[in-house]
Image (tube, rainbow, N blue to C red):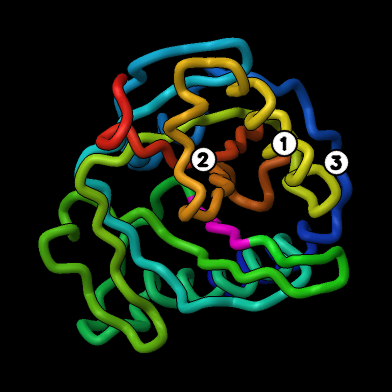
């Protein structure tokens, strides 16, 4: 019953239009005081962005979802992942909720064309050595990954996410990090809050940096 209620609220919340909120960096997601979140080190900060290093993060990811809407694709992927952590996996194992939910985006060539999305759930440390497999899902294992990050509040919407990504790219322009942007990597949106939390929401735009090929 609780699961059905959560799914219903998630579907309804995607219809809400909320303010984007103040953007920047340095906000600790309140959700991470209650659930396990992907760990990282901040190695630098700039005007409106920070540079993070993620070490050995493991994610359970959907296959490609083609859609014109990030919100719709994230909802579709989240429902698959919610079933997964509720025990719909080959081990029948229930897994703790974590943060953030990550949506990787490969943008389309035009405004009316479908983009490709991969939605991922951060695997808790206790499950990372042997994540339960499941049909339609695959594991992503990060070794050492560097990201440029911009934070923003409110509910993620299709109208604002492109603006947030452009703002992050703009803030990196002229910095020492600009040459490290990896054009082969899709950018991502990280959401830390459950869909029925209406205040204190923290979201992030992530752009991958290839610092192994660039001087730090």
Do residues under tags 1 and 2 come within 8 Å of each other at their CB atoms?
Answer: no
Picture layout, residue 91 above or below residue 191: below
Q: Residue 140 carries which label?
A: none
Spatial CA distance of label 1 from label 2 is 11 Å
Which SS does the magenta portion mostly show?
strand
Question: Horizontal and vertical percent for residue 154?
Answer: 75, 36
Residue topped by disc 1? 166
Q: What stretch is highlighted in magenta?
A: 101-106
Chain-order first, disc 2 or disc 3: 3
The residue at which mark 3 appears reads as: 18
Hey, which quadrant is residue 60 in on the image? bottom left
Q: What element carries label 3?
A: loop
Crowdedness near tag 3: few (<14), some (14–19) or many (≥20) residues, C-alpha within 10 Å: few
Q: In this view, does 106 lie to the left or right of 80?
A: right
Residue plotted at (22% across, 38% down): 55
| Residue 37, placed above or below residue 9 | above
Mark 1 neighbour class, 10 Å CA radius: few under 14, some 14 to 19, many 20 or more: few
At label 2, counting other C-alpha atoms closer than 10 Å, the crowd grade (few under 14, some 14-19, many 20 or more) is many
**Picture disc at residue 207:** 2
**Element marked by disc 1:** helix
Residue at the far left: name it. Answer: 129
Find residue 178 and report its horizontal and vertical position in percent. 52, 26
**Residue 140 in the image, given as x and y percentages of width and height:** 30, 63
Name which residue lies at 41% across and 37% down. Answer: 209
């Amino acid at each position: 019953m609780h699961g059905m209620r959560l799914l219903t609220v998630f579907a309804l919340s995607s219809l809400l239009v909320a303010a984007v909120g103040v953007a920047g960096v340095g906000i600790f997601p309140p959700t991470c005081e209650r659930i396990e979140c992907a760990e990282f080190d901040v190695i630098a900060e700039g005007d409106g962005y920070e540079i993070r290093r993620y070490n050995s993060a493991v994610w359970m990811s959907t296959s490609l979802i083609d859609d014109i809407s990030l919100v719709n694709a994230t909802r579709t992927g989240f429902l698959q992942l919610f079933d997964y952590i509720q025990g719909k996996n080959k081990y029948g194992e229930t897994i703790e909720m974590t943060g953030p939910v990550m949506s990787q985006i490969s943008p389309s060539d035009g405004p009316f064309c479908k983009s490709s999305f991969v939605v991922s759930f951060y695997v808790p440390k206790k499950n990372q050595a042997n994540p339960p497999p499941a049909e339609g899902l695959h594991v992503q294992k990060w070794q050492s990954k560097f990201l440029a990050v911009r934070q923003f509040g409110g509910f993620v919407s299709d109208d604002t996410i492109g603006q947030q990504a452009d703002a992050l790219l703009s803030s990196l322009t002229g910095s020492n990090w600009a040459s490290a942007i990896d054009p082969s990597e899709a950018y991502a949106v990280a959401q830390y809050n459950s869909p029925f939390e209406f205040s204190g929401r923290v979201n992030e735009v992530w752009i991958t940096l290839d610092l192994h090929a660039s001087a730090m």
